[in-house]
Image: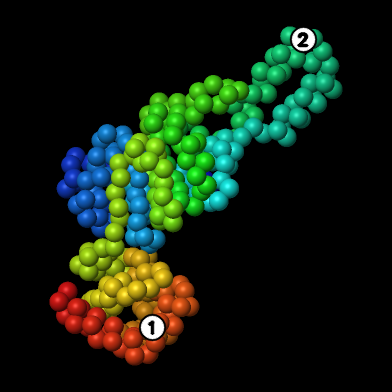
Amino acid sequence: MSEPTPASTTATTALPRNIDDTIARLAALDYVADRALATCVYLGLKLQRPLFLEGEPGTGKTEIARTLAQMLGRPLIRLQCYEGLDLGSAAYEWNYGRQMMAIRLAEAAGTAGSAAAQEALAQSLFSDTYLTKRALLQAIDPANPVPPVLLIDELDRADEPFEAFLLEVLADFQITIPELGTVKATQPPIVILTSNRTREIHDAVKRRCLYHWVDFPSAARELDILQRRVPGAGAQLAKEIVAFVQRLRSIELYKLPGIAETIEWGRALLELDALVLDPVVIQDTLGVLLKYQDDIARMNGSEVARVLQDAQTLARQL
């Protein structure tokens, strides 16, 4: 879990007026969304419903949360999911160390002798003073000056039982703490859940969200993204990069490169002063695009040359 990210002071805090306005405001921050994704985002904001974004790694699911936070001038609270994630790490836990210290200080001062004093001490031990707020509780804290953007990232990495913890948050934007009561957001946060689909997420979670599959972009949209994120790349190089990655995705690989890899490859080639693609520079930098040795080995010299030839044909059409 990360600490809340401060909001941009230059953002326009008003919600988008319509889908076209959503597309334009995202694009102003270099997030190029297709109309289907922009529609899902717009409806999620208007209906105050969580968004569940599923798709291959590196397709911009996490980035949409960061961009929305910047666009709306709201803090971003990120809960990174992992195996073994529990309520104490995701929502709240009691600070037992401070509670024990308070008990010992009361005993040392002789103020915990009577039954009434002991009852008062017990009640004070389970108050906000001793409560450690994690991402989920931070997001729905009634004291928030503005509702944040809550990113629950890679939910498929968490264990299935953890999903049950989320249902109350997603349905009612509240968390029930047995010792303290129910904490409910005065204004609901913008909630975005992502999954790389390494396992299926339970229907009970999906029913509480607006769902969208974030696919790999078209060549034209990926070129727009690359030129925005790596503006120093020449027009011809940018076209060949996008065309090569698009052709790679048609090959049966263990892990297909996402938009994140396209951008990183563009930056790497820019550092190498490449003007166009050639088999040597591709072979030397395949580790930026492909993350498994079997995939790299599959792209031997002749295969790289074949894909490059196809890519050059596609690049001329962009």
> Can the viewer see residue 236 in this picture?
no
Residue ID for mark 2: 115
Quick one: label 2, few (<14), some, or many (20+) residues within 10 Å? Answer: few
> Can the viewer see residue 115 in this picture?
yes
Query: Residue 190 appears at what percent x and percent y?
Result: 36, 39
Secondary-structure class at tag 2: helix
- Residue drawn at (42%, 85%), measured in percent from left and top? 284
Q: Is residue 111 left or right of 294 when viewed as pictured? A: right
Quick one: label 1, few (<14), some, or many (20+) residues within 10 Å? Answer: many
Residue ID for mark 1: 299
Kind of residue at badge 2: Ala
In 3D space, how far apart are the residues under numbered discs 2 and 1 (Cα atoms)?
76 Å
Query: Residue 97 appears at what percent x and percent y?
Result: 73, 34
Kind of residue at badge 1: Met
Of 101 and 288, the residue lying toward us: 288
Of 164 and 288, the residue lying toward us: 164
- Residue drawn at (71%, 18%), measured in percent from left and top? 121
Residue lying farthest to the left in this orientation: 317
- Residue drawn at (71%, 29%), measured in percent from left and top? 99
Check the image and report above or below for 20 versus 221.
Answer: above
**Which label was assigned to residue 276?**
none
Query: Residue 55 appears at what percent x and percent y?
Result: 35, 56
Secondary-structure class at tag 1: loop
Q: Is residue 145 left or right of 94 when viewed as pictured? A: left
